[in-house]
Image (cartoon, grey):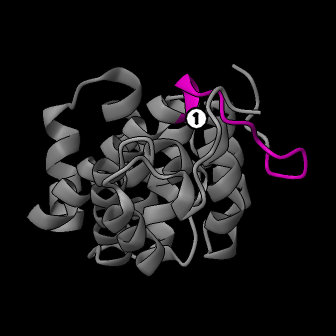
Amino acid sequence: MPRLTPITQREQVPAGGEDAFDRVIASRGSINAPQSMIMYVPEVSALTTAINDALRFGSSMSDADVELAICVAAREFDIRYVWSAHARRAVELGVPQALIDAIADGAALPPDTTSRASIIARYSRELVGRHRMDDALFKEANVELGDRGVIELSALVGYYVMIGCVLIATDYPVADTAAQLPPR
């Protein structure tokens, strides 16, 4: 059980937060695990949902590229819940299982990794895992993804670090049946 009671029903929302709750419901149909914690600050929950929607569903990157970046952010920041929610989806969208396994293990990328997937994985590792960005890697990503794409990628992994902080702080559990992030 997480450290705070998940807020998933309108009646649980702090006074004055009902409109924000309704905006999240309109976007998702329900309150997911991260939002159930962020809903303690309803307006932040609504805004983070809007950011998530823009980065995941309005991105110039493919769904597979987005899921790959999310998996790297989850591994590099040790966000077990995010890993469990996105690793299988990444594979379903065409990210090779061998690449997901390498990310999970913090290993070198498989030699048959596409150039684009390699750039996304290395860029995300550099940014989240090492807290820096090499000039040559930025240029390589910019050539592959364009100006908009590098900002989307940077914001996407940053968004998941923020979500990770909430989930880690509240000790949000991962279902036993979900994909498990191996310990380091």
Vertical comparison of 83 with 142: above or below: above
What's the magenta region? 167-179
Q: Is residue 99 left or right of residue 117?
A: right
Residue 59 drawn at (x, y percent): 29, 73
Indicate the position of residue 66 as horizontal and vertical percent values. 43, 64
Badge count: 1
Screen quadrant of the C terminus? top right
Q: Residue 74: x and y, percent?
A: 54, 40
Classed neighbour count for the residue bearing mark 1: other residues with Cα under 10 Å, few (<14), some (14–19), many (≥20): many
Q: Position of residue 73 (x, y in %)?
A: 47, 41
Secondary structure under the numbered disc 1 in the rendered image: loop
- Name the amino acid, label 1: Ile
| Viewer-side residue, 149 vs 162 | 162
Determine if the magenta segment contains residue 42. Answer: no
Please say whether residue 125 is visible from this viewpoint. yes
Query: Is 101 displayed left or right of 169 in the figure?
Result: right
Q: Quadrant of residue 136?
A: top left
Q: Is residue 27 above or below residue 138?
A: below
Is 23 placed above or below 153 here? below
Q: Residue at x 74, y 23 (%)?
A: 183
Compared with residue 179, is residue 137 higher up or lower down, i.e. above or below? Answer: above
**Residue at numbered disc 1:** 79
At horizontal 37% and vertical 50% (from top left) the residue drawn is 15
Furthest residue in direction left, as rendered? 147
Residue 6 shown left or right of residue 136 in the figure? right
Residue depicted at 37% across the width and 31% down the height: 128
Q: Quadrant of residue 26?
A: bottom left
Residue 113 can be seen, yes or no? no
Considering the image in quadrants, where does the N terminus appear? top right
Rendered residue at 57%/50% (across/down): 7
